[in-house]
Image (tube, rainbow, N blue to C red):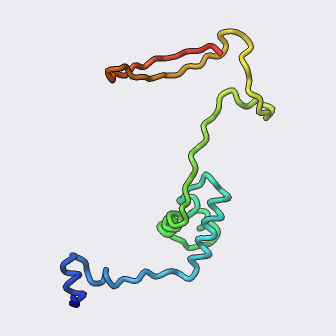
């Protein structure tokens, strides 16, 4: 049994133009996508708004929505910022972790949580002199 397109679209609540829509691609889509990926690799901490600005500076007449679509399609994302580590780097650039030189110079603290046998939580603050 064949059902007409009009009847199916009416039953689903879709417009017929929605059913017949064919997305079109620009002829320079590959080149632009490749350039977006190159800029994202070169400037690792830049997101899609800054990449859009760089593309416009290079002379591409590109919309931010297009860059965001390419950004999603390519699976790009900005990596999380690395936390700053205290006492890890010296001023001369060496990577030697500094050690405490005397008592009570460096303290470390942390919260520890555990549960009792009846399900209640117990939180403790542990403090250690390094």
> Residue 53 occupies which quadrant of the picture?
bottom right
Q: Is residue 126 left or right of residue 90?
A: left
Which percent across, then down, holds residue 58? 64, 69
Q: Check the picture and name the quadrant holding the N terminus.
A: bottom left
Quarter of the image where one finds residue 31: bottom right
Q: Quadrant of the C terminus?
A: top right
Q: In x, y percent, where is residue 105?
A: 67, 13
- Residue 76, x across and y down, in percent: 56, 60
In this view, 85 is above or below 130: below
- Outermost residue to the top: 103
The residue depicted at 79 percent of the width and 35 percent of the height is 93
Q: Residue drawn at (19%, 85%), measured in percent from left and top?
A: 7
Residue lying at 56% horizontally and 73% vertically, measured from the top left: 61
Q: Residue at x 62, y 13 (%)?
A: 129
Q: How far from the left and from the top, in percent, is residue 66? A: 50, 70
The image quadrant of residue 83 is top right
Of residues 15 and 116, the one nearer the viewer is 116
Q: Is residue 11 left or right of residue 19?
A: left
């Amino acid at each position: 049994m064949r059902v007409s397109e009009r009847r199916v679209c009416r039953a689903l609540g879709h417009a017929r133009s929605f059913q017949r829509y064919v997305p079109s691609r620009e002829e320079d889509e590959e080149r632009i996508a490749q350039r977006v990926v190159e800029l994202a690799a070169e400037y690792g901490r830049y997101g899609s708004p800054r990449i859009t600005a760089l593309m416009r500076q290079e002379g591409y007449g590109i919309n931010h929505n297009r860059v965001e679509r390419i950004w999603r399609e390519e699976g790009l994302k900005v990596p999380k910022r690395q936390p700053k580590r205290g006492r890890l780097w010296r001023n001369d650039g060496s990577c030697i972790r500094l050690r405490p030189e005397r008592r009570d110079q460096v303290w470390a603290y942390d919260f520890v949580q555990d549960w009792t046998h009846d399900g209640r939580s117990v939180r403790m603050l542990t403090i250690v002199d390094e």
